Amino acid sequence: MADLRVVVRDLHRCAFLFTGSRAEALELVSAVVRSAARARSGARFSTLIAAMARTVAKEQRRTTTFSILDDDLRQRPKITVAIAAIESLAWEAKRTCFARVLGCLSGSLRVAFVLTDVLGFDPAQAAAMLEIEEGAYRVRLARARRNVEGFLAPRCAHYARSNPCSCSEVGPAWLELGVFDCPPGHDTPRRAHDEDPPIPQASLLYRRLPAPELGPHELIGLAEALRGADE
């Protein structure tokens, strides 16, 4: 069971980056797990993430645009948030913002960035997972990197301290706008959201980003369902 929980957590991490939403991430993971269980296709992470990636790439749907995201990042809250909640909201803003940046890309570009720059699959492996030519994959990856770096480089304080965007200000504003709900109490990392020094490289920022956690009930239920994929 422990190994299956790790697989589910890793799938959920990717699903959140693909969707930018806790609810949609859970729905996406559930669909992939159910499909694997029906097909008895196994519970290996590489098989499951390939299936998830093909689904997202095929849809091509953008979840937002760079223009909308830029406007949202400029919003300032009208509500007063308790000091104790600011760090939790800052973490939720950080994770959600990074996912929303990817959401500005088409599904195929988003998938390329996550497979290679977050998960570390080389272009040949990732292209095989998507069942496309390696040359086509490399074009997608280059475009994804260019767009992500181009947006983060002049804005994100985690990219450069001199940049204007602050998660501690964005968090309360996005809660007020309904971009996300208050995160679960168990799901705030035990360190400051801005503790790490700036990293002027998008792939490293994404790799070091703590993933949102599933609740115990969802985690156990999905791991149990995934067990059926191997039976």
Image (spheres, rainbow, N blue to C red):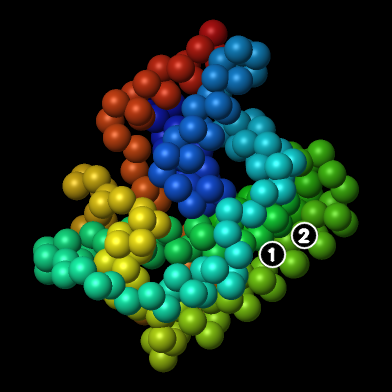
Question: In the current view of this chain or complex, which residue is farthest to the bottom?
Answer: 162
Q: To which quarter of the image does residue 214 belong?
A: top left
Q: What residue is disc 2 on?
A: 140
Name the quadrant of the C terminus.
Answer: top right
Q: What residue is disc 1 on?
A: 144
Q: Residues within 10 Å of mark 2 (few under 14, many from 20)?
A: some
Q: Residue at x 59, y 70 (%)?
A: 66
Q: Residue at x 41, y 91 (%)?
A: 162
Please give left or right for residue 167 compared with residue 7 in the image. left
Residue closer to the observer: 2 or 148: 148
Name the quadrant of the N terminus.
Answer: top left
**Residue 32 % position (x, y):** 57, 28
Query: Can you see residue 35?
Result: yes
Please give left or right for residue 155 compared with residue 79 in the image. right
Q: CA distance from mark 1 to mark 2?
A: 6 Å
Q: Residue at x 66, y 71 (%)?
A: 147
Residue closer to the observer: 88 or 171: 171
Instruction: State whether residue 231 is above or below residue 14.
Output: above
In terms of secondary structure, where does tag 1 sit?
helix
Instruction: State whether residue 108 is above or below residue 150.
Output: above
Instruction: State whether residue 21 is above or below residue 167.
Output: above
Q: Please state which amino acid type lies under the numbered disc 1.
A: Ala
Q: Residue at x 81, y 39 (%)?
A: 131
- The answer to whether the residue labelled 1 contacts the one labelled 2, judged by CB atoms less than 8 Å apart, is yes
In terms of secondary structure, where does tag 2 sit?
helix
Q: Please state which amino acid type lies under the numbered disc 2.
A: Arg
**Residue 218 % position (x, y):** 35, 28
**Residue 105 % position (x, y):** 66, 60
**Residue 120 % position (x, y):** 61, 54
Query: Can you see residue 10?
Result: no
